[in-house]
Image (tube, helix red, strand yellow):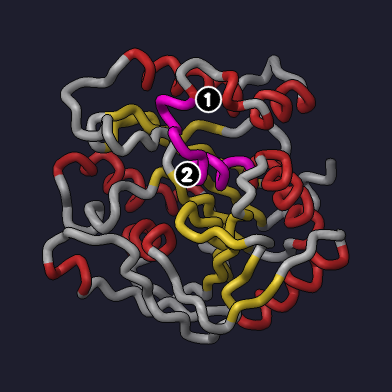
Amino acid sequence: MTHGKNSGLTVLYIPHGGGPLPILNHPGHLELIRFLKTIPDQFETPDAIIVISAHWEQSIPTLTAKAAPPLIYDYYGFAPEAYDIDYPAPGDPLLAKELWAGLEAKGIHSQLDEGWGFDHGMYIPLKLMYPAAHIPCVQISLMNGLDPLAHINLGRALNEILTGKILVLGSGFSFHNMKAFGEIGMDPENVEFDRWLSETMTGTDLSCSDRTDRLIHWERAPHARYCHPTEEHLLPLHVCYGIFETPARRVFDGQVLGKKSAAFLWKN
């Protein structure tokens, strides 16, 4: 492990909420809205943001390389104002090319995409965190094989590449059973998985290898497939963890859409 090399590096895994609802002040998102608005107070304002969004999968890690990526309204069935949300953050083609070259040098085949835009896993949380939209951003896709170790290895490679004041934002959801959202009260399956995840990410009694093994085999966790029928909203956490491979600090312990959700922070 080489964590600690970049003193300006901050890594944050968050729940990004249901579609555009945090921006629309949905009552099931009030705790999350407060969290996203205040969490930037806990670290330096970054010079650039790298977003690992649950809503973009490619065969290999793919990086947005456009100077002004458009917004992708990748949700449906919401009020008209959900499609008027604006977040004109600039892209960072130079950073994207540096990351691409660095990943290639580390043996992780990747690609640049000059046509893709920013999806709601990027602009919904960042509109609350940095409403001025002044910080350049690059998105990196998940790999559609959804292999946990491959995503940890992506984080390990990023650790070797990143320099300067960078925020890596893993944008997903620690609970993502769409059918269960909105039910009254937290269910025991949700609570047990949340406890396991928090112990895994923050427990100082776990060795690095044990923590990594738990994340690779996350399906063995209590009620794992109830909480994540598909794992794309969990895997940004694996990338975040791979960057530091150390215990995180839990910085959100609240409810979103009636379900217990978590956010985790690492910083040098």
Determine if the magenta segment contains residue 165: no
| Residue ID at (44%, 71%) | 118
Q: Is 257 placed above or below 121 here?
A: above
Residue lying at the far bottom of the rendered structure: 67
Q: Position of residue 21 (x, y in %)?
A: 22, 53
Q: Which residues are magenta?
A: 225-238
Q: Secondary structure at mark 1?
A: helix
- Whether the residues at callouts 2 and 1 have beta carbons within 8 Å, the answer is no
Q: Nearer the viewer, residue 41 or 251?
A: 251
- Residue 89 relative to residue 211: left or right: left
- The residue carrying pointer 1 sits among few (fewer than 14), some (14 to 19) or many (20 or more) residues within 10 Å by Cα, namely many
| Residue ID at (67%, 57%) | 8
In the rendered picture of this protein, how many numbered marks are placed on residues? 2
* Disc 1: which residue: 197
Q: Position of residue 198 (x, y in %)?
A: 52, 24
How far apart in space, not on screen, are marks 2 and 1 (Cα)?
14 Å
* Disc 2: which residue: 233
Q: Is 208 placed above or below 122 here?
A: above
Q: Amino acid at mark 2?
A: His
User: Quarter of the image holding residue 62?
Assistant: bottom right
Determine if the magenta segment contains residue 231: yes
Say which label, 2 or 1, has the lower sequence index. Answer: 1
| Residue ID at (50%, 60%) | 56
> Which image quarter holds the N terminus?
top right
